[in-house]
Image: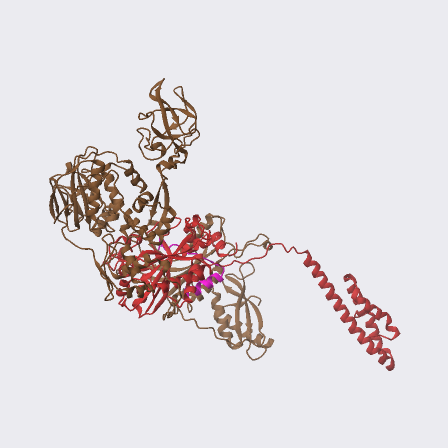
Amino acid sequence: MKASRRWLEAFLRQPLDPADVAARLGMLGAPVDAIEQVGADLGAFVVAQVTDVRPHPNADKLRVTTVDDGSGTLWTVVCGAPNVVAGGKYPFARLGTTMPDGLLIERRKLRGEASEGMLCSARELGLGQDHDGLLALTTDAAPGTPMADVLGAPDHRFEVDVTPNRPDLLGHKGIARELALSLRVPFRLPAIPGEVGLDVPPPHRAGDEATVGGVRLAITDRGCARFLAAVIRGVTVGPSPAWLVERLQGAGLRSINNVVDVTNYVMLELNQPMHAYDAGTLRGPAVLARTARDGESLVTLDGVTRTIPAGALVIADAERAIGIAGVMGGHDTEVSATTTDVFLECAWFDPSRVRAARRAVGLSTDASHRFERGTDRWGASDAFQRAVRLLLTVAGGTVDGQTVDCVPVAANPPRIFLRPARVAQVLGLDLAWTEIERCLVGIGATVVSKPDDGRIAVDVPGWRPDLLSEIDLVEEIARVHGYDEIPTEVRPFRPGARQDDPAWNAAAHVRTGMVGLGLAEVMTLPMVASGGPAAPHLLNPLSAEHGLLRDAIVPALARQVEANWAAHTGDVRLFEVGTVFERAGGGTRPIERMAVGFVVTGGRRPAHWSDGGARAAFDRWDARGIFDRMVALAHPGASVQVEGDRWVAKDPAGLPVGWCGAVAADVPAWADQLFGGEVTVVVSTRSAPQYIPLPTYPASVRDLALLVGIEQPVAAISDLLLQRGRRHALEAVTVVDEYRGAGLPEGRRSVAVRLTFRAPDRTLTDADVDQAIGRLRTSLERELDVTLRSS
Amino acid sequence: MSYEHPSLAPLAARLAAVPTLPADALDAEEIAVMGRKQGELTLLLKSLATLSIEEKRAMGGALNQLKQAFDAAFAARRAELAATAAAVEARQVDLTMPARQSWTGTRHPVTLVVDEIVEIFRGLGFTVALGPEVETDALNFTMLNFPPDHPAMDMHDTLYLGGEGGGGQVGERLLLRTHTSPVQIRVMQDGPPPYRVVIPGMVYRNDAFDPSHAPAFSQIEGLAVDEGITFVDLKATLTHFARRFLGPDTRVRFRPSFFPFTEPSAEMDVGCRLCDGAGCPACKGTGWMEILGCGMVHEQVLRNVGLDPERWTGFAFGMGPQRIAMQRYGLPDIRLLYGGDMRFLTQVGGGTP
């Protein structure tokens, strides 16, 4: 909602400081997002009096004037305006003034006559569009008086952030009411300048049918609960008076013509949208509020042909729809320059019907915005009468017959019972009855009875459709009393009885561990462009780039690596812990599981000068190391196995829970290979590792070079050695080297293993170890066809 | 010790000279004295065999002592020279050369902020609750008192699930939760009050990426329900949080606001930390920064989960860790938080550059 400072000042009859207005509205729940100055800064202009006007010797349309600007010097100014007269006062731009459009006023010759300044029109001052002549000033101010003193300071436009529950703040009156409450001053509807037609009688009450000014009015759809109408004949459609243009401009609306401006003025003032039809275009003549027929269409005011959604509430004449109720009127019945008779509509439409229609046609207007939040059903009559008087004042004409007020179904604003004890229970403070009453009266409610039975009956105002129950009043009392006035003291509380969700702690454990591996945590968007067949689709994605829910973490990480490569960063180490999704089928919700993924590429460690420029990049063995750790963190009990050209983690039941290997990506020529892995995070009970006594006897270490088949897995050799070596006090088998190439038998590679022997109860002798090695050699030869390289 | 025998005097003198021998003379002197074949001391020891018993007694003990003294003196001198050489070498190393680093892991600013918030609320008796990211419209909206087809829905541009997942009846339509509040319902349906939980998680909106909006972002929500909880408790708890999180001198204010699932509702602002309340572009000149939305749990929400609002009252709050991270790290664009630029991550995470 855009609100004009001057308009609010007219309600409150006192000057307002824009920053103060913003602060007060903010503390009442309607923050001001922006304050904009409206109109030119008039500081550069002064009042000047024309003392002499004479014809220009060389131009018929120009005049030469003598201008007194109060400086003591009389200036010669060439002027083209037809309305300049001797003795008249006009805004004057002295030499050296910069105009709002950037033009610098200098001494110059116009058709041979010197001109020393400029007499200005309203448009030249940035005060509207009027450029027919000079802005004639009706002021007693002496020549030389600053224009700002004459026309007042510029207006300010507030951008008020109105929450959806407060339609009343979509009109200046509602905002003025809040400010009056905060300032503790009264407020009053501003008078209409030059108002005529005060003898307009109140509208004639009717049910769902009436005749107004010869036009039949009928309401057949109960989505329209009130319809006020007038026919005004003999209006003159034309420009609005300056005060009306300025009001609308202050509130961010452009003047269109006096009739339309009146409807907009009342909408912005009282939050009651209205519509004016050219009565001469109405067929029948009739106006109906009815349900749309199948396939009906309408050319709306904006010139677009729209299909009216089935079941929508429309305004129609005897033959056709002439408006989508509460959204937009029709083009054919629009008020135009030639209109002389106006049919004025002021109605209450069901908010949900308006909302449904505006969503269906995809057209949000100032009117629909207000109707779908709820207009004042009971205040419509006041708004209507104000509009009629305004129209008669600014456009002339007379009301044909009597105005009507059709109320198909009568209703009263709700009455709510309030218990002061409930106020205390929710707010935590005891408020005096007088303060509760002040708060409620301040928002426009009527307090009906004193709290003798512990309850107060409160009739809520029609402009507050959000107030439906006692708790709504409790909030109003807190709001008006002031949230600042409620104490901030820590009172005793009971701690929560629930345990932490174990998944949270599992994720935290994984994160900490991954950071310890030197990886950087990221948070990628869970909506992705592509995924596996089980990735759930979104019905209304932002774009195809975000059409699926991710079913894996690593692809998104790979895209981030590519972005790093694009920025010439080659050393990248990322991980993410997050939710992945899998379609479950049968209309049931997708399966969500927490997963952790990582990617690494580039230098295994930061480059150092001692490496002499050589750079060791992450390889598959680094990735496997990270993966082993990640599996231990995220999925304890899972084991890592080889499957094809990568590793997979399997849970004790043999189900795959993760993988690790090379990752497909768009690798630039200069960059290193990308590796990554992913594993499902499970919640597990992590018991503390139990202490095993530390060894007290020394170990004996032997290295063996084994001739192993090219495709023979070393893991099998290690397993066999550990199994057979158990009774020989073999503690550990470590692979220390691998060699392939010359000097080896065909089909063999050399793998060096280091065997560590240790007995728990004595120091092993060389003879003990020699004997063990002998036995193990025999096992290797017999069971795996593996021999010692040296033998 | 003295070596009074006159024939030992020259050796005793040489022993005294060992501590000052230069490095290049040390080995030669050791051979000259102790050499296995021609060493002077060695020869004297060998010659003992030819002496009489009296002379053996007189010389034997002295010679052995002398040998031990020489051993010790040569070892000490050698160690001394080695230490000196090492010191010289050390002085020649340029200690301003760059160190050998290792990669440092970093936490993401947002998960770090979430952890900090959770820790503060743990200290106030809250525990962590989680819930699914795909929800029904019933849990995301209806149970939370969003009136059907109401403008309040416009605040939550919703992403619905397509295909077989999205075709449910109203109430069972699957969507990506637009806030973490459905977990409030889940917690309250899970058992009787009191409740005191914080709910971190990812939420989704059908908002295009721009410098201050993202289609998915973190939220952390809180819920406390018990007998006797009032607006005073809400203000006290959240003020305490703000001062723990942002510093003990943090200014806090509460403004009325609107959320369908709380009433009364409020926004909590904290004093702008960049301008200290004077007004700056970051706080749009107001001196305040919005940090969270909150309110007393709406009566209808309590009724919806079968709790009597005359007996149970409570408060709820929610905040956006991305926005908090943006303020904390001075980020101009929320999209930085969704990228994986190593330069950014190490800058804000304090890792190896």
User: In the picture shown, does residue B31 fall above or below B151?
Assistant: below
Q: In the image, is A595 to the left or to the right of A450? A: right
- Left or right: residue A640 versus residue A269 is right
Where is A187 relative to A78, above or below? below
Residue B286 point in image, percent of width and height: 41, 50
| Relative to A598, B223 lies left or right | left
Q: What colour scheme was applied to this rendering of the protein?
A: by chain
Question: Picture coordinates of residue A631 (x, y %)?
Answer: 43, 65
Q: Horizontal and vertical percent for residue A155?
A: 35, 41
Residue B38 visible? The answer is no
Residue farthest along the top direction in this orientation: A57
Figure disc tally: 0
Q: Quadrant of the N terminus of chain B?
A: bottom right
| Rendering quarter of residue A558 | bottom left
User: Relative to A749, does residue A321 appear above or below in the rendering?
Assistant: above
Q: Nearer the viewer, residue A315 or A64?
A: A64
Residue A91, by quadrant, is: top left
Figure quadrant of residue B203: bottom left
Membership of A111 in magenta stretch: no
Residue A128 seen anywhere in this rendered image of the structure: yes
Chain B color in figure: red
In the foreground, A35 or A772: A35
Q: Residue furthest bottom?
A: B53
Most foreground residue, A579 or A363: A363
Residue farthest along the right direction in this orientation: B6
On the image, the x and y values in percent for residue A66 come to 38, 24
In the image, is residue A507 part of the stretch drawn in magenta? Answer: yes
The magenta segment: A505-533
The chain displayed brown equals A
